[in-house]
Amino acid sequence: MKDLMNGFKKTVAALAIVALLASGCAGASDDDGDLFVEGRLAPAAAKDPDAVPVVVDSDLAPDDLVALAYLLRHPRVRVLAVTVPTTGIVTCPAGVDLVGDLVRAVRADPVPVSCGRTPRGAHGVAFPSLWTIGALTDSGLERDLAGTGRPSPQPADRTLATLAREHDDLVVVALGPMTELAATLRDDPASYARIDRVVAMTGIVEGASQGDGIGEWNAAADPDALAEVLDGPVPLTVVPHEVVPLGPPAGKSAPVVGQIGVLSSMPSPRFWDLATSALFTVPEAGKGVSGTWSVDLDDDLGRLSRTGEGDDTVVTSLDTDRLDAAYAEVFIAE
C-alpha cells in the first residue's frame, strides 16, 4: 500500500508535465530519459468480413485506453460499443469525452459509449480519487475539453442486452469492475445468456495483494458483481493481476499509444488491460486452469479460489513475446 500511496503523490506532481504533453509539446521523456514516440498512427487496417463483434466494458484508465485502441484498430475485431460502469476509475460524462478523444487520436471509426447506472454491491470499495485525476490527465491524448461528447441513450446494461440479442457471437472484453455485466445478468438473464464469452482483467489467485484488504482493484471495486458473473451461464476467461508482465511493452512503442499512461507512477503503466485484449485475439499466448471459482468478499477482496470443475478459466501464464508481437502488428507494423 505504501508503494501505491507514493504513486499517488508522484501522480499529482506529474500533472503539470502531463498538461504540456496533452497540449502537443514535443520531445518529452520519461524518468529513464527515453523519448516518447511522436507523430500520428497510420489508418487502422480494414476490418475482416468475419470480424468478431465485441463490447468493451471499461473504466478508461490509461491501460484501458491502450487496450481499447488495440481492439479498435484490430482487423479481426469489430467494437460495437464501449460501456462505462459507475464503479470504475473514470465514469460518465468524462468517459464519453475521453473515448472520443482516443478514437480521433488512433484514427478509428467512432464508437457509441453507454454509461452505467448501477451502484456497486455491498462489499465493494471505491477506487482512490487520485487515480481518477491521474487517468484523466495522463491520457497522453490531445484533449477536447469542450465536453461535446454524447452518450448513447441506452444505459450500459441495456446496451449489453440489446447487442447480445442482435449478435450470436458477441464477446465482452471487461477491463474494469463487472458491475454492468452483473446488472444485465440480473435484469435480462435470457439476453445475457446469449453472450458467447467474457474475457476479463480481474482478480488475483496466488500473487501478493494490491493493498490492505484489496486483492485486486478491478475485482475489489465490486466483488459481488464478479461473483455473480462467475456463477452465471456465460464462460469467463480471467486474466488475474499476477500473470501480466510488468512494464510498458516494446510493441506499444508507437505514435499516440506510446504516450498513454507513462508519466504517472500509478499501476496502470503495467498494461494489464492491453495484455487481456491481446490474449483475446491471440488465445494461444496464454495457459490457464478451468473450473468453478469463488471470490473473497471479506478479507482480501477479489482473491479467487478454485472450488471444482467448470467452464471458467483463470489464466496462469502469458507468453510475453507473442503478446508483444500482437501489439506490434496493430500499432507499429505500418
Image (cartoon, rainbow, N blue to C red):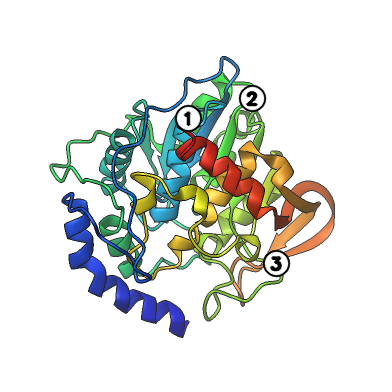
At a point 47% along the width and 20% down the height, the residue shown is: 46
Earlier sequence position, callout 2 versus callout 1: 1
* Of 187 and 37, the residue lying toward us: 37
Q: Secondary structure at mark 2?
A: loop
Amino acid type at image mark 1:
Val
The image quarter containing residue 146 is: top left
**Mark pair 3, 1: CA separation:** 30 Å
**Mark pair 2, 1: CA separation:** 13 Å
Q: Which residue in the structure is indicated by mark 2?
A: 169
The image position of residue 228, as x and y in percent, is 63, 51
Q: Secondary structure at mark 3?
A: loop
Q: Is residue 201 above or below residue 107?
A: below
Q: Is residue 23 above or below residue 203?
A: above
* Of 246 and 81, the residue lying toward us: 246
Q: Is residue 178 something that shows in the picture?
A: no
**Residue lying farthest right?**
309
* Of 328 and 192, the residue lying toward us: 328
Q: Residues within 10 Å of mark 3 (few under 14, many from 20)?
A: many
**Mark whose residue sits in front, 2 or 1:** 1
Earlier sequence position, callout 3 versus callout 2: 2
Point out the image quarter for the C terminus: top left
The image quarter containing residue 14 is: bottom left
Q: Which residue in the structure is indicated by mark 1?
A: 79
